Amino acid sequence: MALKIVKGSIDRMFDKNLQDLVRGIRNHKDDEAKYISQCIDEIKHELKQDNIAVKANAVIKLAYLQMLGYDISWAAFNIIEVMSSSKFTFKRIGYLAASQCFYEGTDVIMLTTNQIRKDLSSPNQYDTGVALTGLSCFVTPDLARDLANDIMTLMSHTKPYIRKKAVLIMYKVFLKYPESLRPAFPRLKEKLEDPDSGVQSAAVNVICELARRNPKNYLSLAPLFFKLMTSSTNNWVLIKIIKLFGALTPLEPRLGKKLIEPLTNLIHSTSAMSLLYECVNTVIAVLISLSTGMPNHSASIQLCVQKLRILIEDSDQNLKYLGLLAMSKILKTHPKSVQSHKDLILQCLDDKDESIRLRALDLLYGMVSKKNLMEIVKKLMIHVDKAEGTTYRDELLTKIIDICSQSNYQYITNFEWYISILVELTRLEGTRHGHLIAAQMLDVAIRVKAIRAFAVSQMAMLLDNGHLLAGNMQRNGICEVLYAAAWICGEFSEYLQEPNQTLEAMLKSKVTTLPGHIQAVYVQNAGKLYASVLQQNEQDGDKEAAQEITQMLIDKLPQFVQNADLEVQERASCILQLIKYIQKLQAKDVPVAEEVMALFAGELNPVAPKAQKKVPLPDGLDLDAWINDAPSESSSDDENPKKMIFHEEEQRSARHRQPEMDEDELARRREVRKQEQANNPFYIKSSPSPQKNYQDASGVDHIPVVQIDLTVPLRVPGMPLSDQYLKLEEERRQQQKQDRQKKKKKQKRDKKGKRRHDSLHTESDEDIAPVHHVDIITEEMPENALPSDDDDKDPNDPYKALDIDLDKPLADNEKLPVRTHRVSEKKSPEIETSPVEEKSKKPSKKAKKEKDKKKDKEKRKSKEKVSKKHKFSENAENEHAAPEEEIITPTSKEESEKPTGEASDLDFWLSNTPVQSKSQPEPLRNEVASEPVASEREETLKEKDKEEDAKSSKHKKKKHKKDKTKEEKKSKKKKHHSDEEAPESVQNGSLDEEPLPPMSNYCLLAENSYVKMMCDIQGNLQDGSQVVVSVIFENQSSGYLKSMEFNVLDSLNTKLVRPEGSSIHDGISVPFQLPPEVSNEARFVFTMESIVMPQKLKGTLTFIVKTDDGSSHEKLDFKLHFTCTSYMITTPCYSDAFAKLLESGELKMCSIKVDGISISFQLLLAKICFHHHFSVVERINSCASMYSRSIQGHHMCLLVKMGDSSVSVDGKCNDSTLLGNLLDELKQTLTEKC
Amino acid sequence: MIKAILIFNNHGKPRLSKFYEHYSEDTQQQIIRETFHLVSKRDENVCNFLEGGMLIGGADNKLIYRHYATLYFVFCVDSSESELGILDLIQVFVETLDKCFENVCELDLIFHVDKVHNILAEMVMGGMVLETNMNEIVTQIDAQNKMEKSEAGLAGAPARAVSAVKNMNLPEMPRNINIGDISIKVPNLPSFK
C-alpha cells in the first residue's frame, strides 16, 4: 500500500503541474494552440488515472485553460470526482474548477447535491467554506431547493466564518428558489444583529440586495436599519444601509424626514469620502421624495451642493466624476441650486478626462436659460470643433440638440439662430446623428411657422451643396439631413426664392448615390416643387418656362425610375407618367397648375409619437357601429373571436358602452366632434405655451401674427454663421432694454424696473422677449388622450419572483424542503418489502414523534405564557430549532398579529413622535413609553382599553397629520433641535478620520450566575420630567428565566412609573421570558423632579429560574445610577445660534482641566459626544465647541481645548449645579477611560 | 453585486477571470478583450470609472478599475455597489496579494492563479463582498495553507523535490524576468476605513 502511494507520487513527479503548463505555454508563443491541444490530450490521459492527486492536478490545469478561453465542460464529471476527495487541497481545486465552469446547463450538476450536503456538514470549517463558495457560483434551482435547509442551519453555525458565508449565499438561494425567502427571512433578519460584524455585514448585504429590487417589502425593516445606521461604525455596512434607505425613501416620505437629520450629521462628521458621497446621494433621494420644498430642507440641499462642489473641485478625478454624477441628480429637482455652480461645471467641460466632460455635459442641460443658451451652445460648438474622437463629438451634438429642444424649445429666443446652429452641425464629418439633426430641422420648420421662410432658404442652400455631403459622407449619417432639407423645400416651396434652381439641385445625378429613402423624398418633393413652379409660371403667363421645366423633369426623372430602391422607382415612375400627361395637356394649352397643386394641398401637422397609442375610445362609442354604419347584433364583441386582437380596447369599450345607443345619437355626437375639431385645428392638449394666443381663434386657416424683426436679414449669403446671432441678440436685447426704460419713464414702472436698473446683468428670463412671436405648434395628440405612461415591466425579470410580502405570517405549507425519511409514508413499498427494517425504524419514528410532540407542547406552553411580543417569540422559536431535521413551523397564532402590528409599528416609528431609538426591536413599545412598559401586554380589560385608546388616538393623529404638517413644518424649525434623537450622538464623532473603538453606553448594572443586567439611561424627549432606562437582561444560566419583576425603591425626587392602581412597592413585571443564553431589552420610565443632581436608586430584580431539575426563586440587587449626563439630549446646534446663546449672558460658567490624556482629539470628541450626548458645533484644529440640552431645557455649552497632554473644558449652562456635576462626570470619563 | 472580476496585463493577457454570472468561454474572452480595449486606452490620470454598459448586463453596470504597474484589476459592478468602496476593495485585494505572496508581481499571478482565486474567494463570494478586513482574510488563507501543507505531508515531498529540480534546470528562473513589481502605494487613496 505504502509502496503504491510512493509509486503514484513518483509517477506524478513527471506529470506537468500547473506551473509547468504555464511555463510551457509561455515557451510556445508561436504555436500556442498546438501546444495546448497537446496538453489537453495529456490531461485527458491523467484524468483516466485512479490516483486522485493526478486528477486534481489535471483539473487545476483545466481551470487555467478555462481562463484562456478553452471549453472544459467535458471534464465536468472528473471535476466532481475531485470535489468529492476527502483531502481539502483537492476538494478546493475541484470546487474552484466547478465554480469556473458549472452553470445551470451542466447536466452532471445534480450529482453534486449529496456531496455538497456532506461538505456543508463537515466538521472542518474550511470544507464547509469551500463548498459554500463554490455553490455560490453555480447554484441551480434544484440545488437551491435541496440545500436551502442545510444552508439555513449553517446560518446559526458557531463559527462566524461559516455564518457569514451561509448568510451571503442565501441571496443566491432566494434568487433560484424564491419559495425559500419567507421561511428563511426571520433568521436572516436576526442576523442583522449578529455579534460578529462580518455576519452582520453579510446580512445587511443580502437584505440590501433583496430590497433594492422590491423595496416596498422591506419598509418594515426601516427601524432596524435606522438603528444599525446610527450604531454601526463599519463603513461598508453604513454605505449599504444608506444606499438601501435611498431606495426606500421614495416609498415612504416620512422615512425621508426622519433620515435627514442623521444623514446631515454624517455628512458633517465623516471624513470617508465614500460614505460622504453615499450620504449625499441618499439625502438627494430623500429631497426628491419630499417634493414639496420644506424650508429647512433648502439647507440640506445647500449642504449637499456645497459638499459636491468640494468633490468636484478635488484633484482626484474619481471624486470629480462622482460629484458631477450626484449633481445631475439634484439638477432634476433643484435646478436652481445647481445653477449657481455654473462656472465650475463649464470648467469641467475643459477637463482632459472624457468621462468627466460627459458628466458635465449632462449637467449643462439644467444650466441653460433664455439668457445664456446662446453662449453655452457657442461654447459647445467650440468643443465640437476641437473634439477628437467621434464618440465625444456625437455626445456633444446630441447634448446641443437636447438642451436647445428641451421643454418645447422653451429657451430658444431666436429660431433663426437655432436653424443656423443645426446647419453648422451638418458640417461635422462622420457623425452618426444625422437623423437627429434632420428631425430637429423638420420639427422646427413644421412647428414654428414664422421660421419657415428662413428655414427654407437655408435648406435650399444645403441642397445646393448637397453633393458635398453626399460625396464625402455616403456611409455616414449626416446625409440624413438632406432628407429634411428636401422635404422642407418641397413642402414649403412657396417660400423658396429660386425654386427653379432648387429643383435642379434636387434632380442632379449625384443624388442617385444617396440612400434610397432619401432619394424617395427627393423625388416626391421634386414633384411638389414642380407643382409650385408650374403654378407660378402659369400665373405669370410664362408658358415657355412652364414647358421648359416640364421638359427638364421628363429628362431627369428616368434616372430615378431605374433606381434599385423600389420606393424610389415607384414614386419616380408615377410622377414621370403624371408629368408626361401634364406635358400633353400643356401642349394643348390647358391650364393644369391648379389641379397639380391640388395633389399636394393641405397642411401636415406634427403628430406626437405616442398619439396613436393613446387614442381612447370616446364615451359611448361602439366601434362596430362606427365602421359598419349599421350596427348589427351579430357583431357583438364576445361573439367575435377576431376581436381578441384588440383585447384591451374591447374591455375598455365594454366598460364604457352604454346599452342604448341609437343612430341619431351617434350622428349627433359625430357632428359635435366634427365641430370641435373644426374649432380646434391643432388638437392642442399639453403644455400651452404663453405665446399660443391663437388657440382661441376659430377657423382652420388661421394664420398666426408674425412680427419679423427687420434688423435680422432673412437671407444670409453663404453658409450661415450662428455667431452673428449672438451679437444681434445682444443688440436686440439692448434695444429692448432701452425701449423698456423709455416705457418705464412714461409709465413709472414698479420695483421690477428698478431692480433691472440697478443691476444691468440680472435680467430675468421673462424680460427677454423672443425675436418672433413664435407659435410652437404642439404635437398633436388624440382627444382625451390618457396621460398615463404605460411602461411595461419586463416579465422575465428574475428579481420579480422575489417580490414577496415578508410581513404576512407564514402559512403551514411554507417551509423549506427537508430531507425526511421516506418511511413516514404508510404505503411506502419499502415498508412492505422489508418488515424487519420497518421494525427497527418504527421505534425511532415514534421517538421522533414523541419528541416532536414534546417540542410542540413546549412551544405551545411557552406560546401561552410568553407575552405576545413577536420578536421574542421568534427568538424562542429559533432557540427550539434543532440543528438538523428541524422544520420551521410557523406559529400562526402569534404571527397573525404581525402584519397589522408591524405596519402600525412602522407608522408609529415614522410618525414624528420622538423615539428612544437606542434599541428598536419593538417600536410599538414606544407608544406607551410614558406608561409603564411592562403593563402594556397584560390582558386585563383595563389595560386593553387603555391600549385601544392609545391606538385610536394614534389613528386620529394620523388623520390629522396632513392638516398638521403645515403647522409642524413651521414649528419644526424651532422644535427640531429638541426633536433630535439620542443616537445621533453616535455618528457625531464616532465616524471620523480614524477608526474608533466600539463604544457603548450600556454599562453593567448587576450580574449573578443567572442573569446579567446592562443598562442605559436616556432622557425622554416627550416629557421633560422623565427618563427612560433601557435594561438588557441576559440569561446566563442553562434554565429558563420567568416571572421577572423589576422594582426600585423610589426616592422623593425620582420615582418609577408604575401602572395605575398599583402601590409604590409593587414591582413591574418584565414583559418576556428568557430562554438560556438569550438576552432581551425592557424599558422602564422614571419621573424626576429636579435634574441638576445625580441620583442613585436601589432596586431588586426577582425571577424564577426553571431548569430540568426544577425551578427556584432568585433575586438580584442593583443600584441604578442616574448621572447628570443621562438627562442630556443630543441636540445639534448651529454656530450662529451657539454664538447668540453665549452672548446672551444668561449662562453660568465653570471649567475643569484634565491632565495625562493620550488619546487623539478626534476620539476625545467622539467620546464626549457619545457618552455625554453632546454634539460638535464647530471644530478648529484641537479646539471644539459642543452643545447639548437637558430634558428640562437647560442649555449646555462646552469649549474643549486640547493641549499637549491635557484637556481643558470650559462649560456654560443655565444652572451651575448641573454644570458642575456634569463636568465632574466628564472628568471621570476622560480620566478613567483614557 | 459584483458581476465579474478581471485581471489582465498591459497587453490584455488574462491573469484571472471570475464571472459571477454564466457566460460561455467565447463570450468571456470577448468581454475580457473589450474591457481591455476600453481600459487600456485611458490615461493614467483619468477617473477609474467607466460606464461600459453593454459589456455585461445592462446600463446599470459600471467598470471600476485600478492599474498597478503591469496589471489592470477590473471589477464590473452594478449600481448597488459604492464606487469608492469598490476602489478600496481593489486596493485591499492587491494589498492582500502582496502580503500572501510577499512583494507580489505579475509572475506570481501567472504561476499561481489558483492561489489568487483562493484569496479572492475569501473576499468576494458569489458576487457579494464577504470580507474587507485584510487581516481576517490573511488569517483564513494562512490557516488553509497550513492545512494544505499538513495534507501534502510525506507524499508531497518527492513532487516538491522534482519541481525544485525542474526550476533549477531551467535556463531562466521566472522570477528573474523583470516584469516590474506591482506598486502598492497609491497616493490618492480615498480614506475609506
Image (cartoon, coloured by chain):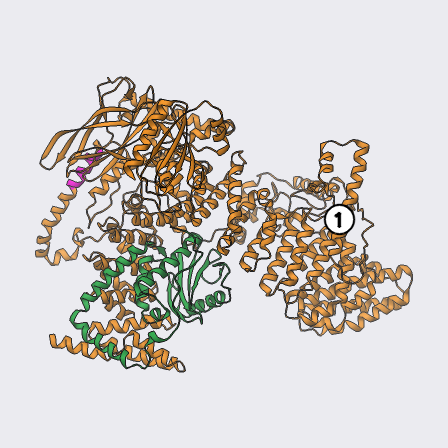
Chain colours: A orange, B green
Residue at 24% x, 63% y is B145
Residue at 54% x, 49% y is A328
The quarter of the displayed image where residue A984 is located: top left
Q: What is the quadrant of the C terminus of chain A in the image?
A: top left
Residue B170: % across, % down: 30, 81
Q: Is residue A780 visible?
A: no
Q: Which residue is mark 1?
A: A730
Residue A912 is left or right of residue A734, and the answer is left
Give the main secondary structure of the magenta stretch. helix
Of the pair A541 and B139, the residue shown nearer to us: B139
Residue A88: % across, % down: 22, 64
The quarter of the displayed image where residue A1098 is located: top left
Residue A1201: % across, % down: 40, 37
Residue A860 within the segment the image draws in magenta: yes
Q: Which residue is at the far front? A: A1204
Residue A721 within the segment the image draws in magenta: no
Q: Which residues are magenta?
A: A853-863
Of the pair A143 and A1163, the residue shown nearer to us: A1163
Residue A670 is left or right of residue A846, and the answer is right
Residue A1228: % across, % down: 29, 33
Q: What is the quadrant of the N terminus of chain A in the image?
A: bottom left
| Chain ID, mark 1 | A
Of the pair A839 and A1070, the residue shown nearer to us: A1070
Q: Which residue is at the far right? A: A541
Above or below for A325 versus A9: above
Residue A1086 is left or right of residue A1116, and the answer is right
Secondary structure at numbered mark 1: helix
Q: Amino acid at mark 1?
A: Glu
Of the pair A989 and A1022, the residue shown nearer to us: A989
